[in-house]
Image (cartoon, coloured by chain):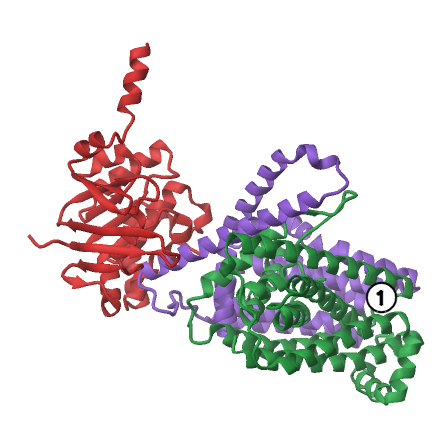
Amino acid sequence: MHIPDGFLATPVWAALDVTAVPAVGYLARRAQRGLEQSKVPLLGVMGAFVFAAQMINFPVGLGTSGHLVGAALLAYTLGPAAAGVVLTAILAVQALVFQDGGILSLGANIINMAVAGMLAGYLPFRLWGKGRRRREAIFLGGVLSVLTSALLALSELLLSGVAMPAAVLRISLGLFVVSAVLEGAITLAIMQALESINPDFIRDPQSHGGRAFSLVGMAALFVAVIGVAFASTHPDGIQKLADATGIASRAKALIAAPMADYQLGVWRSIWLRKAGAGLAGLGLIFGACLVCGRLLARQRGT
Amino acid sequence: MQALIDVRDLHFQYDDGTVALSGVDFQLFPGETVAVLGANGSGKTTFVLHLNGLLKGNGSVTVCGMPVERDTLTAVRQKVGLIFQDSDNQLFMPTVIEDVAFGPLNLGLDRHEAAVRARTALHEVGMAHACEKAPYHLSAGEKKRVAIAGILAMRPEILVLDEPTTFLDPPGQNALLELLDRLPQAKILVTHDVDCARVLANRAVFFDKGRITGEGSVEEVIGRFNWDRTALKRQATSRL
Amino acid sequence: MHHVVLDRWSRGSSPLHRRDARAKIVAALVFLIVLATAHRSFIPLAFAYFAILIAAGFVAGLPVFAVLKRAAVVLPFTAVFAAISVAAGEPMRAAVLVVKSYLSALAVLILVSTTPLPELLRGLECMGVPRYLLMVIQFLHRYLFVISEEAQHMCVAAQTKSGSMRRSLFHGSRFNAAAGALSVLFARSYGHAEGVYQAMLARGFQGHFRTFANPVFRKADAVFVLAALAVLAGVRLVLEVWS
């Protein structure tokens, strides 16, 4: 899910780079907060841990195995702001040193994985990490972190006009769901193992204040996730929905204008036009979810 | 002669309640090298972490006449140079020269002075050729020498070394012992390596369950606590 | 490991290596942006840019074939999407995708192969990237090898223990064993971090990393940036006007 350079349309990568800059600045300030640079070695070493951890195979039968992605795990052990910084660092090293992911598309990858994916993974833990449903919350967090990043990446690719017939889309979504479930299981297994070594490794999901925001964020996230999945496979349904709510025309105008000069040939395909419009509308909902997520992180005083 | 390090009745307990030190008295005089022997978990490392204020227990710890407390930490850490067992943890900057210059920079020296100090220290330990190298290109012995350079660059009066010969092969160990023998600072050597203690130290203390239960010359302490393989060697030769 | 190889390549002394990191970063960004936004006269442009990168590789004294091969890691991912585009009846689109992603990866590779990571990070700091993030990247890079080695040792140890289990369909116990291994690696990494912090404190760290090296932007660097800008933009302008 690391998008290389050359895939995204200029307005898409440019907009995401512009969004990523203040987002990363905010995360870095939050993570640093008064502790100056004392936590730098911890964050750096745990980033190296995630890299190394991706080498360890989790067998799931029939000769296949998966590996940890780590956004949720980092959020549960270091807190969301620090996790965001570590994930950004990981993405930067992957792009620069390992040519995994592009540089112009680094903003997109950061938003998808270090910001949105990480927050989506953190939300369930924040809401339910203290109760009887702690294990389910951790599992759900793992699932949502991967699912959110993958769906966002997919939307960005679709918006950029990368060809994706419905059959391929369905297969991709299926693969996303499988990796998401795997991440949930792996994250839960590691968290349980960590708890038996040293419970202090895991942060306390404070549940005072901001609960309303977290729930709204959670709901928005569910809508966005399910909505994007639906949109990708049923563009006509979304078109009707978008028409009904008036989003479609506005979204089309938003996208058509800057895209027009670039003659990408995207809009020749009616299906893609509809999907693009629908996705753009849902993208707006997701943007709202991100804002909620940020507000809740601020409220929590992490 | 005033003691460089003066520890009186030091007690320390970890957060989970484990008692690590239960009343330690210790003194280090100029020019001395003291070997600190004892079983794993006997409190040796915990003890030395108090000498530069990384841990704070109950009792008094005085370094070069200064009590070790929050206000004096910077000055104490310049006087007491602690060399950890794991050299990878100690060499955390991207290049050798940048790592050795870390200490002088923290002492307030400017870049130019820090660079001069770093190069001098690297020269002292025989690693001047490795200035621009990255730490993972160095062997275990080289890393240890660079770690020592990093401490020497701060011009300490006391060197505390925690298990310095671990991970080193025999040639590496010999080179290290030679280097340490040359250095004029007073030294504390926490070590399992009995030969290292014999070669370098003029005195030894023995830790057991958080207190010092024996003191004296190195041979005396080794003999009293059976801290080497003399008995085994005797058995082996008697079998021949 | 690749990053060790990259480290070696980046410690050369060619004219390109000696340029200030900021100049190289700007040149690389210009390359990436001009390439990303290009769509007319694409084929000749692609050839021209490929030639420019190869020339840069030679000037830098890099093992050009190895560099070309390394940049190709982006191709498997791209090939999938290219194949889909071809199947959807848009072969030109597929070609553009492959070329853009490969040339972009090659440009970035040449940047990092001629600039040691610490210098690159210092250049980025001068250009406004938060210091906190850059220090985290620096430490991550430093301990990447250390932690990866420990992970490898754990993998080998686990393999020697679980040979007989390979046949069983239910891999639950191996799953949990992997989780257990990761949690141990986590604890060890945490231990390393604590050790590093203690070592920092022991050498007088008071909360801020002080800068050691001071990059100097020379005339040669200015010339390089302007030349790069002129060549990259100029080639595209000329080719587009010509077509």
Q: Which chain is red?
A: B
Q: Residue at x 56, y 65 (%)?
A: A86
Quadrant for the C terminus of chain B, please.
top left
Neighbour tally class for label 1: few under 14, some 14-19, many 20 plus, Cα within 10 Å: some
Q: Position of residue B115 (x, y in %)?
A: 32, 60
Q: Position of residue B161 (x, y in %)?
A: 28, 47
Whether residue A56 is visible: no
Q: Position of residue A265 (x, y in %)?
A: 87, 75
Q: Which chain is purple?
A: C
> Closer to the camera, A213 or B156?
A213
Q: Residue at x 26, y 65 (%)?
A: B73
Furthest-left residue in this view: B1
Q: Indicate the colour of chain A.
A: green
Q: Amino acid at mark 1?
A: Arg
Vertical relation: A291 (above or below) B209: below
Side of A290 relative to C192 (left or right): right
Furthest-top residue in this view: B240
Q: SS of the residue at dot 1?
A: helix
Q: Position of residue B174 (x, y in %)?
A: 29, 34
Chain label for disc 1 = C
> Closer to the camera, B189 or A124?
A124
List the residue tagged with mark 1: C93
